[in-house]
Image: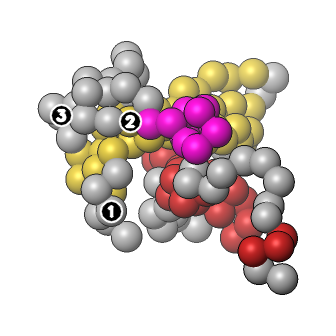
């Protein structure tokens, strides 16, 4: 898995655009706030078109992921913010936080893009049984 920064894609303030090796473009950001002795990280990834508009799934909703993480280690805040962003695009993270494999799948925008093509509604069981 790889990605490349894209300065030519217009995204919202605080976001950066990256292109995945699949050709999908993703707008990323991670906000940090200090609350009650912890750093709260709120990372978001949203699939966008070349013009910065949202990619919509088969259900008509934007393809996006949001991840929130709280950590008391201020000195590690920069690395943890980077790891939140990396997790959102399905890239390897450092060993600072031991995230579960399931969590890494759940927040991964690549997973959201794969699921975005599934049509909502009842499954036609007669077509497979």
Q: Which residue is mark 1?
A: 22
- Disc marking residue 7: 3
Q: Is tag 3's residue or tag 1's residue first in the polypeptide sequence?
A: 3
The quarter in which the N terminus is drawn is bottom left
- Mark 2, secondary structure of its residue: strand
Q: Earlier in the sequence, mark 1 or mark 2?
A: 1
Measure the C-alpha gap from mark 1 to mark 2.
13 Å
CA–CA distance between discs 3 and 1? Answer: 18 Å
Q: Residues within 10 Å of mark 1 (few under 14, many from 20)?
A: few
127 and 48: which is toward the camera: 127
Q: Which mark is residue 48?
A: 2
Image coordinates of residue 9 in percent, x first then y, are 23, 31
Mark 3 or 2, nearer chain start? 3
- Tell me if label 3 and label 2 are in contact, CB under 8 Å: no
Residue 40 image point, x, y percent: 68, 31
Percent from the top left, x then y, of residue 38? 74, 32
């Amino acid at each position: 898995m790889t990605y490349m920064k894209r300065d030519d894609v217009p995204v919202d303030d605080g976001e950066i655009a990256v292109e995945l090796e699949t050709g999908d473009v993703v707008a990323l950001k991670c906000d940090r706030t200090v609350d009650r002795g912890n750093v709260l990280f709120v990372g978001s990834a949203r699939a966008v078109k070349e013009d910065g508009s949202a990619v919509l799934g088969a259900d008509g909703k934007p393809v996006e992921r949001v991840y929130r993480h709280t950590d008391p280690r201020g000195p590690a805040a920069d690395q943890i913010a980077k790891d939140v962003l990396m997790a959102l695009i399905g890239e390897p993270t450092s060993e600072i936080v031991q995230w579960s494999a399931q969590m890494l799948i759940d927040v991964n925008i690549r997973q959201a893009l794969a699921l975005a093509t599934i049509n909502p509604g009842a499954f036609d069981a007669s077509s497979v049984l």
